[in-house]
Image: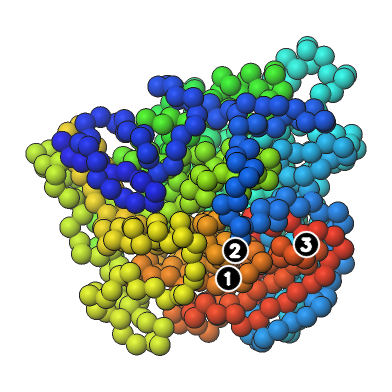
């Protein structure tokens, strides 16, 4: 028997011996308020109805007299765009100097409008998709914004009510929809499933598409943000959904993971979209094959539960492997069928297996077959930071932003966000920790003791290229002070206590142990003592390769400045931070300097919104090496500007 790893307020700790796949839940990473059930729990809250007959969770009101997060303003997420900006808007002010080489387009996607006529969406993920564009050229910046004209958006606007069930909001009842039509709709999901692609945006060749988990993407004109078309990927390849974060390779190939329904049950399949090409057909005529025409399943792994496949938002890729993290948050097929009939939101189909492991599947890119599966502590995640094989090919390193459970999805209901200041647990629910798993690829001997750590290398950074300090000098020594911080950020008393109490956690290393049944249990290490979300790296050169730095937004609401950008050095386990009171930045996107030589030579761009000035939006440009501001452009827009989620930057060629 060996001791297991657990999360406790962000700490990695050793507790009672691990003998089976279940884990204790007392005082875990976060508290659990779901109804306990051995077979899993549906993520379903108790509801009451507002004046528009919309269901609102009523168990998240908190203490209305308390104010635990005086510096955090959740209203930036709850704004609704009242007017599009179709023609480019010139910046009202530019400070600093924009690098001459920085010419291109930053596209952003995210929630745009929580209102439809007299009705209101009840969850942040239901908000109508809104695109933002920052155009940078010759030291000047322009801004535009426009709604993605999805089918659900057009039908909602025409009917002036919520037509489709969304992630957390039920559709407004249609008086013409009989019970027989509801039954028929179960067998025609395209008539009832929302195509609100408000999560991310990615390029497929020279075309840009907005994403959500549904297999429907919308093509966007990057010049004026017009919605040009709609692609249903399931018509090209056998999948019923896909992740919101495909991987775009340097040669233009795109990979994503989708769920396929096969005669043997659900299967997580990797789909490859090859670059467009021209062929000669049987008649001798030239024919262009789009990336979607060439969509091909190149590998996969079956779901461990036949009727409850795992929810996936991201996946991993290295030079030789695909990595699928099968977390114990599942989608109940049975509940999904009932949802169609009862007109309930998507979140009610989620089932959390609190006492089940997280599985990490490693799949060969060459054969498409599963190589091995690792076992990890129960955790919930949205975003993988990066992954790579060590230079000796003996290990795979996997970095993930981890939560103890998915309770934060419930706390993204608008009513819960409005009342967050009275909830002492709110910040803990959103405190994702960047954890590093090291996966040993060698097969241990059957008589290997469970106490034996299978990770024998001193450090996973084996390339000399990463050993470079800010001044360009050598940094090959390994006896540095691992907790040395490079910022003077202030924390409130509660967060400062956590930080001091658990700083020693950064000293701990990943480990792996062979279980009696032959499986390998992997235990992670902490990369940073601040909560991190929406992580980005130098994707152009370091996706799936050994890397040192990532950039993220802090998800610690108890910081003095909750709107904080972070640069994390995964080698030293140190961080740099940028913040400004009353300013909320978006996901930081790294843009490499075309003439740069090092991993962090370039800039980080992020869009800004203000708490005091809801109609103002800005573009922040940071020097990626020093993480200091070098330029900023601000815009006064005709109406409120909501905070966005994910984006993509493309340099002009």
Q: Callout 2: 10 Å neighbours few (<14), some, many (20+)?
A: many
Q: Is residue 404 above or below residue 287?
A: above
Disc 2 + disc 3, Cβ < 8 Å: no
User: Horizontal and vertical percent for residue 59?
Assistant: 60, 32
How far apart in space, not on screen, are marks 2 and 3 (Cα)?
15 Å
Instruction: From the image, tell me which residue sits under label 1.
Output: 579
Q: Considering only order in the chain, which callout, 3 or 2, is on the residue closer to the N terminus?
A: 2
How far apart in space, not on screen, are marks 3 and 1 (Cα)?
18 Å
Q: Residue at x 81, y 43 (%)?
A: 115
Q: Residue at x 50, y 62 (%)?
A: 492
How far apart in space, not on screen, are marks 1 and 2 (Cα)?
6 Å
Figure disc tally = 3
Q: Is residue 528 above or below residue 13?
A: below
Q: Residue at x 15, y 36 (%)?
A: 1
* Front residue (pair 599, 362): 599
* Front residue (pair 207, 472): 472
Which picture quadrant has residue 529?
Answer: bottom left
Which picture quadrant has residue 226?
Answer: bottom right
Q: Is residue 208 above or below residue 283?
A: below
Viewer can see residue 45? yes
Instruction: From the image, tell me which residue sits under label 2.
Output: 563
Horizontal side of 98 relative to 523 (left or right) equals right
Element at label 1: strand
Q: Callout 3: 10 Å neighbours few (<14), some, many (20+)?
A: some
* Front residue (pair 538, 166): 166
Instruction: From the image, tell me which residue sits under label 3.
Output: 614
């Amino acid at each position: 028997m060996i001791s297991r790893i657990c999360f406790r307020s962000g700490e990695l700790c050793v507790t009672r011996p691990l003998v089976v796949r279940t884990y204790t839940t007392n005082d875990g990473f976060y508290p659990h308020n779901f109804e306990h059930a051995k077979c899993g729990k549906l993520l379903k809250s108790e509801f009451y109805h507002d004046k528009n007959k919309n269901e609102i969770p009523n168990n998240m009101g908190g203490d209305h007299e308390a104010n635990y997060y005086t510096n955090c303003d959740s209203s930036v997420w709850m704004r609704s765009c009242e007017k599009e900006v179709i023609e480019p808007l010139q910046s009202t002010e530019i400070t600093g100097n924009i690098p001459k080489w920085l010419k291109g387009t930053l596209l952003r996607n995210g929630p745009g409008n929580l209102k439809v006529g007299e009705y209101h969406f009840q969850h942040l993920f239901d908000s109508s998709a809104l695109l933002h564009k920052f155009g940078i050229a010759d030291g000047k910046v322009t801004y535009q914004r426009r709604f993605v004209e999805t089918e659900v958006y057009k039908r909602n606007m025409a009917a002036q009510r919520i037509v489709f069930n969304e992630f957390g909001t039920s559709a407004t009842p249609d008086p013409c929809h009989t019970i027989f039509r509801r039954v028929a709709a179960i067998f025609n999901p395209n008539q009832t499933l929302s195509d609100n692609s408000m999560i991310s945006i990615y390029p497929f060749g020279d075309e840009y598409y907005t994403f959500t988990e549904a297999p429907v993407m919308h093509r966007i004109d990057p010049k004026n943000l017009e919605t040009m078309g709609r692609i249903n990927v399931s018509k090209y390849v056998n999948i019923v959904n896909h992740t919101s974060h495909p991987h775009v390779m340097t040669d233009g190939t795109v990979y994503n993971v989708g769920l396929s329904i096969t005669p043997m049950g659900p299967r997580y399949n990797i789909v490859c979209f090859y670059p467009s090409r021209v062929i000669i057909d049987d008649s001798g005529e030239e024919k262009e094959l789009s990336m979607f025409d060439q969509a091909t399943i190149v590998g996969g792994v079956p779901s461990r539960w036949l009727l409850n496949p795992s929810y996936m938002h991201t996946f991993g890729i290295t030079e030789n492997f695909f990595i699928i993290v099968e977390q114990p948050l599942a989608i109940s097929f049975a509940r999904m069928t009932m949802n169609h009939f009862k007109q309930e939101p998507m979140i009610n189909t989620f089932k959390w297996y609190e006492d089940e492991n997280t599985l990490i599947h490693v799949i060969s890119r060459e054969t498409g077959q599963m190589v091995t599966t690792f076992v990890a502590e129960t955790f919930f995640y949205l975003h993988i930071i990066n992954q790579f094989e060590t230079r000796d090919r003996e290990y795979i390193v996997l970095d993930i932003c981890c939560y103890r459970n998915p309770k934060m999805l419930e706390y993204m209901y608008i009513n819960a966000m409005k009342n967050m200041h009275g909830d002492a647990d709110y910040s803990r629910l959103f405190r994702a920790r960047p954890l590093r798993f090291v996966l040993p690829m060698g097969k241990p001997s059957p008589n290997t003791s469970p106490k034996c750590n299978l990770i024998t290398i001193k450090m996973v950074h084996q390339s000399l290229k990463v050993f470079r300090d800010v001044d360009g000098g050598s940094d090959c020594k390994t006896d540095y002070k691992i907790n040395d911080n490079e910022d003077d950020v202030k924390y409130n008393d509660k967060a400062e206590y956590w930080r001091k109490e658990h700083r020693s956690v950064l000293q701990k290393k990943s480990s792996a142990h062979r279980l009696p049944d032959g499986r390998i249990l992997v235990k992670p290490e902490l990369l940073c003592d601040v909560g991190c979300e929406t992580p980005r790296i130098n994707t152009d050169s370091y996706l799936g390769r050994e890397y040192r730095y990532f950039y993220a937004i802090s998800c610690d609401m108890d910081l003095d400045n909750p709107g904080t950008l972070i640069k994390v050095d995964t080698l030293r386990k140190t961080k740099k931070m940028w913040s400004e009171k009353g300013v909320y930045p978006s996901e930081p996107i790294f843009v490499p300097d075309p003439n740069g030589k090092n991993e962090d030579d370039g800039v980080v761009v992020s869009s800004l919104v203000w708490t005091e000035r809801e109609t103002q939006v800005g573009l922040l440009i940071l020097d990626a090496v020093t993480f200091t501001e070098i330029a900023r452009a601000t815009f006064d827009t005709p109406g409120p500007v909501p905070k966005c989620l994910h984006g993509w930057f493309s340099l002009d060629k």
